[in-house]
Amino acid sequence: RLNISIKIILSGFLLAYFIGNLSLFDNLLSLMAFMMVIAFIENNTVTEVSNQPLVFNKKIILLGSIIIVILTIFIIKITCQKAYQTNKMIANAYSAGSIEEVIETYAQAYPKALVGRQEVAEQLGNMANDIANNPISEITKKRYFDLAKNIMQNEINYHPNYARLQIIYGNLLEVEGNFKEAIKTYQKVQILAPKRQNSLMQLAMLYAKNQQFEQSISLLQKTYFLEPANEEIRVYQGVVMAMKGDREDRNKIINHLTDKGLNKNIGLVQYSFALTNDLNDFLEVCNKRLVGNINTSPLAYKTWATTAYNLKNFPQTATAVYAFRRHFAEEENFVDAREALYIKQDALNGKNPDIFFQKVIE
């Protein structure tokens, strides 16, 4: 019979094994460790051991050994070696001399991968934004998108209910400019993960890009009700209003943001004004909401200053960098106050404000 100590050990191992499998794929090492503990317990709990010698059939042992060796070599050849070759090819892709080589490396690696095919597909799909923004030929871009779509579709056929693959594939289609197919893909994501806010917002923005504004606004409203505290959704509503050309509703949404919401989403807020060529109005919002506000972040100050600089509104640039330096200066520190005046003058003279934020924003 098992004593209490052994029962505790076995219970602990079973619990750890169960919890581990909730988040991690089981591996051979954990199974080996488990079996070794069971063997140890068995050896220490068996009281009667037979003294009779074991009789072995040498021919059977020899035949069994040969079969085991052949099977081992076969398994290593089929799984481990091919997996190693695939991983090596993917690793070599990072040091490839050109984008074309990287694409061809993935094209060769995917069919050879017996394990990890999904990871290869995901890595390739996640390259979409980099490829689209890279100054390479349109032929190379087309080669990439055709390859990535084929591989992603193949993986989705194997794993139709895996939302992550659908999300990557939807982003791939969006970057390519195929909004209609991207919408269909994100609609599938909506079914698979109905409460995933990022995917819902992505689908809403795709509706807007495809001129389906009512569907976009309706979906963002439903998404907002899932978590009313998430003001990013409200900002996206403002962006859609701007895309629609509705300045009044966009301004209402932005004006009702809390200080935290404005600071956290300052880049998106700026984008909503840029869509309607109203960046001077954005500067007014910054001037009213950011100066003297203890909640204003360095990023908000920088966005304000950079926007003003790009508009050649140097007085606004100076106001932003001066407010930033005074805000983050130590109290009653004369050196910091004097420095704030110096950088304000530099900004008035048209100096790029980025240099004033380097120590704070990395």
Image (cartoon, grey):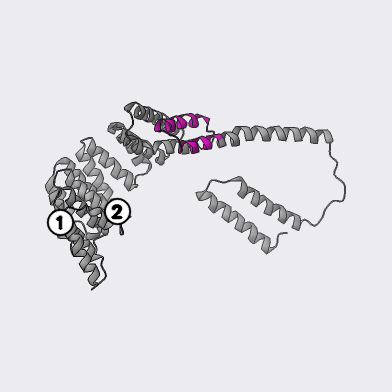
- Quarter holding residue 215: top left
Which residue lies most toward the top here? 139
- Which sits in the foreground, 300 or 358? 358
Which residue lies most toward the bottom here? 332
- Which sits in the foreground, 242 or 53? 242
Q: CA distance from mark 2 to mark 1?
A: 43 Å
Q: Amino acid at mark 1?
A: Leu
Question: On the picture, is 313 further left or further right than 260?
Answer: left
Mark 2 falls on what kind of element?
loop
207 in magenta? no
* Span shown in magenta: 85-114
- Which label number is shown at residue 227? 2
101 in magenta? yes
Main secondary-structure element of the magenta-colored stretch: helix
- Which label number is shown at residue 348? 1
- Which sits in the foreground, 234 or 215? 234
Quarter that holds the N terminus: bottom right
* Crowdedness near tag 1: few (<14), some (14–19) or many (≥20) residues, C-alpha within 10 Å: some
Question: On the picture, is 121 further left or further right than 356?
Answer: right
Q: Residue 352, percent across and down?
A: 22, 52
- Which label number is shown at residue 261? none
Q: Earlier in the sequence, mark 2 or mark 1?
A: 2
Residue plotted at (26% across, 41% down): 205
- Quarter holding residue 199: top left
Q: Residue 144, percent across and down?
A: 38, 30
Q: Amino acid at mark 2?
A: Glu
* Crowdedness near tag 2: few (<14), some (14–19) or many (≥20) residues, C-alpha within 10 Å: few
